[in-house]
Amino acid sequence: MQKVGGFMAGMVVPNIGAFIAWGLITALFMPRGWFPNEQLAKLVDPMILNLLPILVAYTGGRLVHGPRGGLVGAVGTMGMAAGSNIPMFIGAMAMGPLGGWLIRRFDERFGRRVPAGFEMLVNNFSAGILGMILAIAGYSVAGPFVASLTAALAAGARKITTAGYLPFIAFFIEPGKVLFINNAINHGVLAPLGVAEAKQAGKSIFFLLEPNPGQGLGLLCAYWLFGKGTTRTTAPGALIIHFFGGIHELYFPFVLMNPVTLAAMIAGGFAAAAVFAATDAGLPATFSPGSIFTAIALAPKGELVRILAGIAAGAMVTFLVAAPIVKRAPAPEAGAEQFRFATEPAAPAATALAPTAAIVFVCEAGMGSSVIGAGVLRRKLEAARLDVPVTHAALSELSRDAGIVVCQRSLAARVAEIAPRARVYAVDDYINSPAYEQIVRDLLPPPSR
Amino acid sequence: MSIAADVIHVLLGREPASREDAIGMIGEFMVARGDVTPRYVEGMWEKEARHGTWLTEGVALPHGTGEVKKEIRRSSLVVLQMPKGVDWGGKTVYLAFGVAGRGDNEHLRLLSSLAAVLVSKELVERMIHATDPQEVMAILSGEGGA
């Protein structure tokens, strides 16, 4: 379970910068943004629909099988992006690793049988053909998938409201938002209900539910205070764009990287809706973008306090539930052997490393486990006919220029600190570790042997 | 590469109450033979408490810290077989290899040879179930079909 969580974070975290770029562009240039600009606003849709899911898919595929895996995953995801009208992040997070895994299977099975001289040709065509198949499959699956998901969540939301258990609507709104069908829910379900109600009462609670920025604020505060590594440092920036700019999409990746936090979003949404309902709060029209400023500006006289109370309740409850979840999540950097790929520049694994780089096996004292581990790894490399020296060292002796480091999982974070450029592989078991096979795979140049 | 037979000592069918106890058995044996001083055994406990020496499924590798290296008089590899298993920091261990290698080179040779044996699950199984010390000896000194 933790491994899956770490893997999802590994797909999302390296791409948060792109989310921020998109968020800034959107907050600045959209029609009701800070500096509306029709031309530059044309960036908004292609970026969120295509660029961001494809980046996530590429990263996911690369975690599984290097740049080739990333490529196939990205091409497959393009099919899904073209086949749907919402950003396909869930699809990308499935298609990316799937594409990587399929091409890895292919390489494992046929890679060594290719006659000399044909490697490039086979490599490119295998990736190309597999990518094409996945893109077509993605295209034909994405549309119906999104439609049925949207329909299901919308039907659920509608049922809740007619049954009168309004706060429970959070169970449909919050997951829907993170799946990027927030607009479908807001404009397709909530807005019509709100318009009908506002006609009679002059205001409606339905306009408050989806655009409420409170829950996102709570989540990002939790990451800001308790997150680790990149997530901690990017949370405040995302928070500003989300809470003041009203671009909620900025917090979605923080949920996707650790889906357990969805519980916090639902709890916050529930609390906010309960406060809105109890105080009989409402707005005359839906507010968009969902920023704190729009909420304040649209609030009728006498409503402001109630609305702010609901937003605050959403933020508080989300924060309280999310804080322990975020705190307990493993730091992505210390996560796993494959993990480093995500945060490293796209150095083509095989060629850049090949025969010159040495491997250092590190343990606390450099006396026991690392010597054994180095011995085992040496045998595996010999068996694969890789002429790579393996040395062993105590953590305190590790050079900051080390290229490839193998260590016990608990030391991975410290190794990364000492040797920031090193490719780190973590092991639990010194004798039978999947990391050894991974190292051999990464060192074998795929096309030319 | 093989381990010299006179370095290997096999203790079969032991039932230590804890991993500390297991290390005590190994240490006592090494000290009684004059291979290490009592200070080395303290180093083994220290190492265990600080980082643990679990190695792989069913196997641990107790050894001293860097500070007590010079307490080794003679290279020694004590194999402690515990058929009932003992809890080794949350994992069950059936074989503990107490290691004391005199001098860096010998220490390395000892451990590398040991690694070569431990990669074979079959040999590890055989050592766990061995009833004759000679069988373990043979496996470790490279005569057991490794």
Image (cartoon, rainbow, N blue to C red):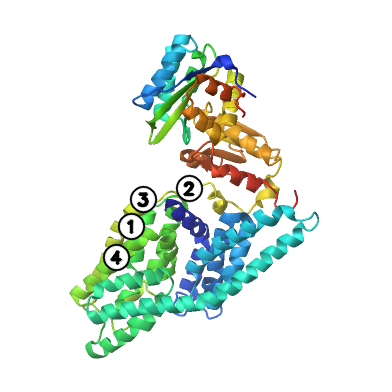
For the residues bearing labels 2 and 3, Cβ distance under 8 angstroms = no
Residue B51 is left or right of residue B106, and the answer is: left
What chain does badge 4 belong to?
Answer: A
Give the alpha-carbon distance from disc 1 to disc 4, as whole Å: 10 Å
Report how far apart the C-alphas of labels 3 and 1 lie in the structure: 8 Å
Q: How many marks?
A: 4
Per the image, label 3 sits on a secondary structure element best described as helix
Q: Earlier in the sequence, mark 4 or mark 3?
A: 4
Q: Numbered disc 3: what chain?
A: A
Q: Are marks 2 and 3 on the same chain?
A: yes
**Which residue is outermost to the left?**
A278
Amino acid at circle 1: Ala
Q: Which residue is mark 1?
A: A322
Residue under pointer 2? A335
Q: CA distance from mark 2 to mark 3?
A: 14 Å
Q: Is residue A327 above or below residue A239?
A: above
Helix, strand or loop for disc 1: helix
The residue where tag 3 is placed is A327
Q: Chain of mark 2?
A: A
Q: Are marks 1 and 4 in contact (CB under 8 Å)?
A: no
